Image (cartoon, grey):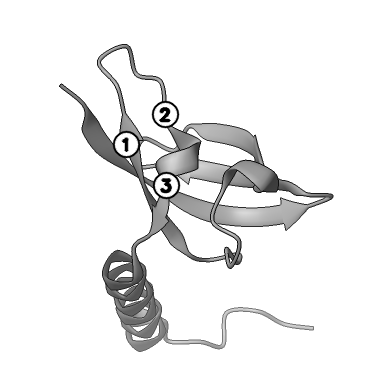
Amino acid sequence: MSTEQHYAVDRIRHRTALLVDDEQRQTLVPTSRLPRDLAEGQVLLVPVDEAGTADWGRARIDEAEGERRRVQAEQAIEELKRRDPGGDVEL
């Protein structure tokens, strides 16, 4: 029985993607093994077998999860802005 794991695309350099799973583990994967239209900031849903091996060839972009994470990050930033009184840095 296989499961699926989310991976965020942290960056893409020299035809290699740095992917980060939900436990913050980083994995380098050649972009040739991933969806062609992959871009930084997107979220992949990747089948993983019982041994924990990801099937990169069957990875697909999860637009809904990517949007959910973008909204969550924007809300966290706005909350931090509301709580920051400012004026604590002198130049």
Query: Residue 33 at x, y = what percent?
Result: 60, 42
Does residue 76 sit above or below 85 in this rendering?
above
Query: Residue 47 at x, y = what percent?
Result: 32, 36
Q: Residues within 10 Å of mark 3 (few under 14, many from 20)?
A: many
| 72 lies left or right of 18 | left
**Which residue position holds label 3?**
59
Q: Residues within 10 Å of mark 2 (few under 14, many from 20)?
A: some
Furthest residue to the right? 14
- Amino acid type at mark 3: Ala
Residue sitting nearer the eye, 81 or 57: 57
- Amino acid type at mark 2: Ala
Residue 47 is tagged as: 1
CB-based contact (under 8 Å), mark 3 and mark 2: yes
Query: Residue 79 at x, y = what percent?
Result: 31, 80
| 36 lies left or right of 63 | right
CB-based contact (under 8 Å), mark 3 and mark 1: yes
Q: Residues within 10 Å of mark 1 (few under 14, many from 20)?
A: some
SS assignment at label 2: loop
SS assignment at label 1: strand
CB-based contact (under 8 Å), mark 1 and mark 2: yes
**Which residue position holds label 2?**
54
**From the image, which quarter does the N terminus lie in?**
top left
Q: Residue at x 78, y 49 (%)?
A: 15
Q: Quadrant of residue 69?
A: bottom left
